[in-house]
Image: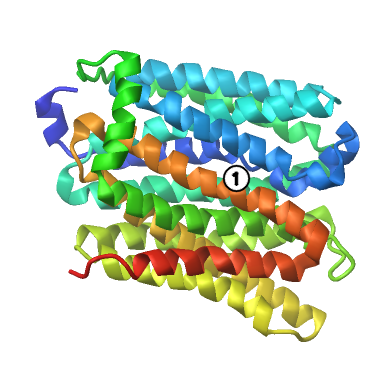
Amino acid sequence: MSPSHAQQDISPGMVWLFAVATGLIVANLYYAQTLIGPISRATGLDPGAAGLIVTLTQIGYCLGLLFIVPLGDLVENRRLIFIALLTTATALLAASATSSAHLFLFACFCVGLGSVAAQIVVPFAAHMSRPETRGQTVGKVMSGLLMGIMLARPVSSLIADAFGWHAIFVISAAGTIALAFLLRAKLPQRQPDSGLHYFALLGSMWQLLKTTPVLRRRAAYQACMFGAFSLFWTCVSLELTGPNFKLSQSGVAIFALVGVAGAIASPIAGRRADQGKSRSTTLVALTLGVLAFAMPLLVHATQLVNLGVLVATSIVLDMGVSANLVTGQRAIFALPPEIRSRLNGLYMALFFMGGALGSSLGGWMFAAHGWTGVLWTGLAFPLTALCVFATEPGK
């Protein structure tokens, strides 16, 4: 990308394209989250291991963030996105066609690996933005990403109710292929000039982690928040379809759809970060995470009231997670552009590890200690983040 081009701000149409693309890509990680029950029955997966469906997808995503996303600082970005999306589509088709638990889990891992294309797209948007509007641009793009995460659950539930769980994977594979060709046609070429070989690039990531305290701190905050997020959304469908609420998959879909309202926090957080209010925004975001799990632990009433509290929990938790994510990425993208893809890969990988921990803990806690055990475990994540935040030097 030429310097003259970099001085021009990104167009609104391109921001929309980036936002929609990241949402569609990252949704692939979450279609299975509310379908754990029917998928486990169809593939013969043991109920105690059902959390692996989400966990392996997130592990694949983490590995892709560490070993594929850094290539955004080395190879032409548009081609990298195209190849990653075709890989994702192939894995989705494999998931739709198999009745083997092992093959399905391997396909989930590959879906996670290829879906890191979203995290090549986000730094691409940051590169095309002026510094003074970068937070707002990233906030809008991340709104699309978060909408993809949140809409994936209701969409997959509704499609599974109508056509069976296989259908969502076939539809998503077709959409991912179409998106790959659209982005190849619309995105400008971006050839980085890092001067490093691949293994030197990977080796530099450990040095970046050691020498970039803002990266370590922001990753710690978001690992805790995303752990709570993954735990909640992995287990809430099991609670909602269980004896306490007895909702259908369509009922779970409506519940998840309401949680989408939490995405409104993303552009607000981006704008506040551009105004230098990252510290107070972070405090609010982490506090929302605590509040989200405290509400259902404190309120015990009728079935309708309890359901309303869970709806409020989903919205408040999603607001806290999205606000903290965008604030963190704004801080990361303020660092030198030549290391931006590696920093973003590290940031996302570290907090997705928190997500993988949350989803695996959630499945085990629900089986061993029920919904109350899940809530107490979820509460521990944002409380830990607040303890880390308390050690941040004041400004």
Mark 1 is surrounded, within 10 Å at the Cα level, by few (under 14), some (14 to 19) or many (20 or more) other residues, namely many
Q: Secondary structure at mark 1?
A: helix
Q: Nearer the viewer, residue 182 or 126?
A: 126
Q: Is residue 154 above or below residue 311?
A: above
Identify the residue at image location x=73%, y=74%.
307
Q: Nearer the viewer, residue 302 or 6?
A: 302
Give the quarter of the figure containing the N terminus.
top left
Identify the residue at image location x=53%, y=76%.
291
Identify the residue at image location x=54%, y=38%.
26
- Is 144 positioned to the left or the right of 365 in the image? left
Identify the residue at image location x=22%, y=40%.
129
Instruction: Give the percent coordinates (x, y) of residue 173.
Output: 64, 25
- Is 168 positioned to the left or the right of 266 in the image? right
Instruction: Give the percent coordinates (x, y) of residue 392.
Output: 28, 65
Q: Is residue 143 above or below residue 284?
A: above
Q: Is residue 371 above or below residue 157?
A: below
Instruction: Give the percent coordinates (x, y) of residue 204.
Output: 28, 27
Q: Nearer the viewer, residue 305 or 180?
A: 305
| Residue 96 visible, this angle | no
- Is 143 positioned to the left or the right of 104 in the image? left
Q: Is residue 191 above or below residue 284?
A: above
Identify residue type, mark 1: Ala
Instruction: Give the percent coordinates (x, y) of residue 93.
Output: 71, 22
Give the quarter of the figure containing the C terminus.
bottom left
Q: Nearer the viewer, residue 219 or 233?
A: 219
Query: Residue 343: which quarter of the image?
Result: top left
For mark 1, what is the residue?
356
